[in-house]
Image: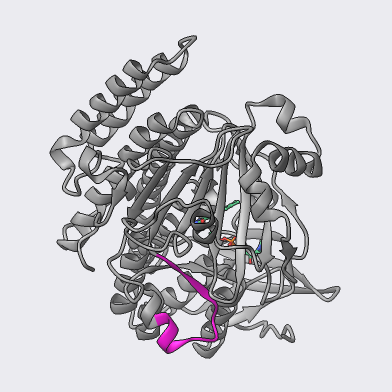
């Protein structure tokens, strides 16, 4: 768009970054009565990663929709209503989380007890299911809503500096080689990385203190074969599956890490390796070498990728650096950062979208209760910082445990039940309209105790020279015992054979 800044216009809040978090924050705060502008350095539609949604994300979308008078947002909380309202905005059905363990040098195999499979349903039907978001589509749509709402939207705009004087920001920006100035009382960083916070506020981002150490190699592909068709060709029965595994967040678990496979309803699939960077020889390899090595090692991965065609967008394979990062400070004088800007662990368990939406809820509450941007605003932002930090730490612990178990799928299976238990605890609270403060109940002593004591046991076990079947069974039993008081979904019930049909009440 043409960058026209009315120099006399003073915004209450300037938001940088028009991903879904920046756009929804802008829309919500506009409904709270603030005069908002949204500054984006790129242009929509653009490729973005972070696609697999969850029931928690859906619940928060519905809550934001009704609380902030955004009725159209409700449609995006279920596959059925999304398709009915906006068939042109691409998404995929996500009925739950599916995991398949592949062993090096062997074709995928399993048994009647689904020993190498784990399927956890999160919804009861396609109609009511979660979604895989094609971010280029949904993010671009949200920006049209931003414009319709009369929010100042400046894209293709690079922020060069920000000066704070007399409780006001003077933000210098560059659009098409023209310098512009934007005035605002408060600033929200929703840029999805720590780069801008460093540039404007000298706040650094680092991977210090994370337990997880991973990196990703990913892209979008057209016409990838359906995994369930491959299972059928192998005569592997899927008749007791809770759903079609291709309509889910499908994970292939490898010894070196894992793969996400997220299918959209236009024949496009998001596919990515997330690999353990503690494996130094792997980390040093070229992207192409890793890609080829994985295909050589895992024959079914090779089969899936053999005719893979890169989608037009992004059109290339992307390699990330270390995924883990956290800002040393989440707010300052006249500014705050959104959760994904503050930090990130790893996409395992798809926590990102829900974590970001939970942050929007909190920031909207805090700012609408502090319209003059004076105290107690900063006390509340300090509490926000404490909350997001604790949440990140819990996600880190849960994900780090998974990487320790990837060579032993039964251990992976048992360990991941902690995540599903905490999710169910949080979902149940929201369903009952009870107040929830921390994502995944990260503030609850019992959650911390369960996670930390299980992690201690896991560390002890995985440091052993060999891990016996008896060790694995003992660990599994101990997790089963720990989650027992909260396990309303029959998790780890042997007769379910790793197939969980209902973990969430009908929403
Ligand atoms: C590899 C990977 C896989 C993931 N998979 C999942 C998943 O399956 N499920 C899930 O829930 N989450 C996932 N996530 C997390 C997910 O990506 C984030 O939760 C989500 O993108 C957060 O949205 P956002 O709007 O905050 O940030 P972003 O999507 O990063 O958007 C930030 C926006 O800010 C703009 N911007 C950047 N710098 C500037 C600047 N200086 N000035 C102005 N604008 C700027 C960018 O162009 C962009 O439009 C994944 C993350 C990674 C890294």
Q: Is residue 447 left or right of residue 277?
A: left
State whether residue 438 appears in this view. Answer: no
Give x and y (percent) for residue 39: 64, 72
* Span of residues in magenta: 82-94
Q: Residue at x 48, y 86 (%)?
A: 86
- Quadrant in which the N terminus is drawn: bottom right
Residue visible at 41% across and 44% down in the picture: 117
Please check the rendered image and state whether residue 444 is part of the magenta-colored stretch, yes or no: no
* Residue that protrudes farthest toward the right in the picture: 177
| Camera sees residue 432 | yes
Residue closest to the eye, 462 or 211: 462
Does residue 140 lie above or below 50 as drawn?
below
Please indicate whether residue 26 sits to the left or right of residue 292 in the image: left
Residue 456 location in percent, x, y? 36, 19
What's the coloring here?
one colour
Q: Nearer the viewer, residue 488 or 175?
A: 488
Above or below: residue 369 compared with residue 501: below
| Ligand 1 located in image quadrant | bottom right
Q: Which sits in the foreground, 494 or 61?
A: 494
């Amino acid at each position: 768009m043409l960058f026209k800044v009315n120099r006399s216009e003073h915004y209450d809040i300037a938001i940088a970054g028009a991903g879904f978090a920046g756009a929804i924050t802008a829309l919500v705060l506009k409904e709270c009565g603030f005069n908002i502008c949204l500054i984006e350095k790129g242009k929509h539609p653009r490729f973005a990663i972070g696609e697999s949604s969850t029931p928690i994300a859906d619940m928060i979308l519905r809550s934001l929709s009704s609380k902030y008078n955004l009725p159209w947002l409700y449609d995006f909380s279920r596959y059925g209503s999304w398709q009915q309202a906006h068939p042109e905005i691409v998404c995929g059905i996500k009925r739950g989380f599916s995991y398949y363990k592949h062993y090096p040098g062997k074709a995928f195999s399993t048994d009647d007890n689904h020993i190498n499979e784990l399927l956890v349903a999160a919804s009861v039907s396609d109609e009511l299911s979660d979604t895989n978001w094609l971010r280029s589509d949904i993010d671009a749509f949200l920006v049209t809503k931003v414009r319709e709402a009369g929010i100042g939207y400046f894209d293709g705009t690079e922020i060069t500096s920000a000066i704070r004087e007399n409780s006001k920001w003077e933000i210098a920006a560059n659009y098409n080689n023209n310098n512009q100035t934007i005035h605002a009382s408060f600033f929200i960083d929703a840029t999805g990385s720590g780069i801008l916070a460093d540039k404007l506020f000298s706040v650094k981002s680092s991977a210090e203190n994370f337990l997880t150490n991973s990196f990703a190699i990913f892209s979008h592909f057209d016409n990838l074969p359906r995994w369930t068709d491959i299972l059928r060709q192998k005569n592997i029965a899927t008749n007791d599956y809770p759903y079609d595994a291709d309509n889910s967040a499908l994970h292939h678990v490898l010894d070196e890490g894992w793969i996400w496979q997220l299918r959209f309803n236009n024949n496009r699939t998001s596919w990515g390796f997330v690999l353990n960077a503690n494996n130094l020889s792997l980390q040093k390899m070229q992207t192409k070498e890793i890609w080829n090595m994985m295909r050589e090692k895992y024959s079914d991965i090779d089969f899936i990728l053999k005719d893979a065609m890169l989608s037009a967008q992004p059109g290339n394979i992307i390699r990330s650096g270390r995924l883990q990062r956290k800002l040393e400070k989440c707010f300052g004088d006249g500014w705050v950062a959104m959760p994904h800007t503050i930090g990130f662990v790893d996409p395992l368990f798809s926590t990102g979208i829900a974590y970001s939406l939970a942050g929007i809820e909190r920031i909207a509450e805090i700012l609408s209760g502090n319209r003059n941007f004076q105290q107690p605003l900063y006390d509340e932002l300090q509490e926000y910082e404490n909350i997001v930090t604790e949440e990140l730490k819990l996600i880190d612990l849960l994900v780090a445990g998974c990487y320790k178990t990837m060579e032993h799928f039964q251990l992976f299976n048992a360990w991941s039940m902690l995540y599903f238990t905490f999710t169910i605890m949080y979902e149940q609270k929201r369903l009952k309209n009870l107040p929830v403060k921390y994502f995944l109940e990260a503030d609850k002593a019992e959650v911390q105790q369960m996670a930390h004591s299980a992690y201690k046991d896991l560390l002890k076990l995985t440091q052993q020279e060999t891990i016996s079947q008896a060790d694995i069974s003992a660990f599994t039993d101990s997790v089963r015992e720990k989650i027992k008081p909260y396990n309303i979904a029959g998790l780890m019930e042997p007769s379910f054979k790793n197939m969980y049909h209902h973990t969430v009440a009908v929403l």
